[in-house]
Amino acid sequence: MESIKSSEIKRLSLFFHQGTQAYVYHDKKNAYKLYKCNNKMTAMFNTMDIDYQLERLSRINLNSYVTPKFKITDDRGFLAGYGMDYIKAKTLNRLSLRVNASKFIDDLKRLEEDTYKISEEKYILRDKNDRNVLYNEELGFKLIDLDYGTFLDKKTNDDIYRRNIKFIKDIIKSSVYGVSLFDKIATYDTELAFCLYNNESLTDFIEYYESETKREKTLIKDIRKKSCDLIITKDYYGH
């Protein structure tokens, strides 16, 4: 896995975003994630498995997952971040309500397939943040910031897939329904409860409402409107 110097990135690219743990730059081709590290944290990164993890992730090539392309090092050669493809799409927390629901379902099915494949690589998602999921109708879903996940070689593929698919379904559900991950649905009909919580498929709960609206071209806003009939009790963590 190739590496470039962090000083080159700041000189040749544009500042893009400041997150909790990192700064992000881009040059319209690549995005560059630079960790917010002092000398102590930088040294700690290089004694951990992050270097190995980035290397292993870089060998995974899936449409829905934006994996690292190269490492970024500081002037001393310590790991400072990594580069990945720059994706021009909105984060899922800014999902357009005018997205076609049928197209959204097709993209979800492709995301499901890719999630099974990345689970076969023993990788598990850990950073449950809908800003790490990008989406538009042309590209479909793109998951970024994979460095916060981990590889669990001792777990079975099916176990990892179940955990990953629940992880993603929670994020999708919050965006489609406008329900916070930390809200609890207090009352709901039996079919909705089954679709949201009991099925492993990501698409079931959307297909259910698509059939309920009885419209040829259902939009995400139609699904969101239908879900407003639910009574939401906030400030209570629920699954």
Image: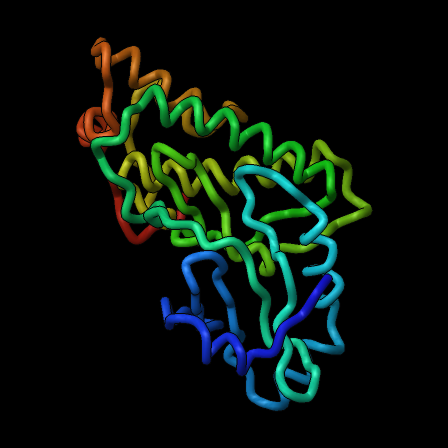
Measured as percent of width and height from the top left, residue 226 is found at 20, 24
Measured as percent of width and height from the top left, residue 203 is found at 44, 23
The N terminus appears in which quarter of the rendering?
bottom right
Q: Residue at x 43, y 64 (%)?
A: 27
Give residue 52's quadrant in the image: bottom right
In the rendered image, the vertical position of residue 167 relative to residue 15, given as above or below: above
Q: Is residue 136 left or right of residue 34?
A: left
In the rendered image, the vertical position of residue 196 relative to residue 214, given as above or below: below
- The color scheme shown is rainbow
Q: Nearer the viewer, residue 19 or 75?
A: 75
In the rendered image, the vertical position of residue 68 relative to residue 90, given as above or below: below
The C terminus appears in which quarter of the rendering?
top left
Give residue 219's quadrant in the image: top left
Q: Nearer the viewer, residue 82 or 30?
A: 30
Q: Is residue 110 left or right of residue 230?
A: right
Question: In the current view of this chain or complex, which residue is farthest to the right?
Answer: 154
Tally of numbered discs: 0
Q: Residue at x 22, y 14 (%)?
A: 213
In the rendered image, the vertical position of residue 229 relative to residue 131, given as above or below: above
Measured as percent of width and height from the top left, residue 91 is found at 35, 49
Q: Residue at x 52, y 57 (%)?
A: 145
Q: Is residue 153 left or right of residue 230?
A: right
Q: Nearer the viewer, residue 75 or 211?
A: 75
Measured as percent of width and height from the top left, residue 82 is found at 59, 66
Q: Residue at x 55, y 37 (%)?
A: 63
Residue 225 in view of the camera: yes
Residue 194 in view of the camera: no
